[in-house]
Image (cartoon, rainbow, N blue to C red):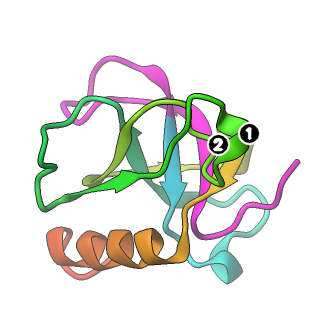
Amino acid sequence: MKSLEQGRIVWAEMLDPSGANVKLRPGVIVTPTEDITGDDPFVVVAVTSTFDEPVPDWQVKLPWNRDKRKVGTQLNKPTAAHCMWLIRIRASEIHDVAGVVPPQALKEILVKVAQYNGGGED
């Protein structure tokens, strides 16, 4: 399995923002890499393919390509990180591990997570 690190995209079953509709969804790990240990919970920002154009300030568009092998995120359709939709998951709940968000997009995600969630992931 690819390493679990801040900025890595993982697939896990997640509830939608209203607390319903469990579905296999991608999420971007926002917990610092050094804080991801064993099967302790860590935080991801949910990734959605349903968003407005232009994206709201609390979302960050992610790079994608129909051929996911050609993009670092390994996302194959337009998506956005929903920076107000934080979910705690464990390594044991991950169904798949994908690519990594580019550094500039990760920086933007982390700033918006702090801005829209009272200063941070916890």
SS assignment at label 2 = loop
Query: Tag 1: residue type?
Result: Arg
Q: Residue 107 appears in which quarter of the rendering?
A: bottom left
Q: Quickly name the residue at label 2.
A: 74
- The answer to which of 75 and 70 lies nearer the viewer is 70
Instruction: Give above or below for 64 relative to 121.
Output: above
Q: Does 19 sit left or right of 91 as displayed? A: left
Q: Residue at x 45, y 20 (%)?
A: 23
Residue 119: % across, % down: 23, 82
Q: Residue at x 33, y 17 (%)?
A: 21
Q: Quadrant of the C terminus?
A: bottom left
Q: Does 23 sit left or right of 97 as displayed? A: left
Q: Residue at x 69, y 82 (%)?
A: 34
Residue 59 colored in magenta in the image: no
CA gap, disc 1 and disc 2: 6 Å
Mark whose residue sits in front, 1 or 2: 1
Q: Does 110 sit left or right of 114 as displayed? A: right
SS assignment at label 1 = helix
Q: Quickly name the residue at label 1.
A: 69
Instruction: Give above or below for 72 relative to 37.
Output: above
Residue 2: % across, % down: 84, 54
Query: Tag 2: residue type?
Result: Gln
Q: Within 10 Å of the Cα at label 2, are there few (<14), some (14-19), or many (20+) other Cα atoms?
A: many
Q: Residue 67 appears in which quarter of the rendering?
A: top right
Q: Which segment is the magenta one? A: 1-25
Helix, strand or loop: magenta stretch: loop
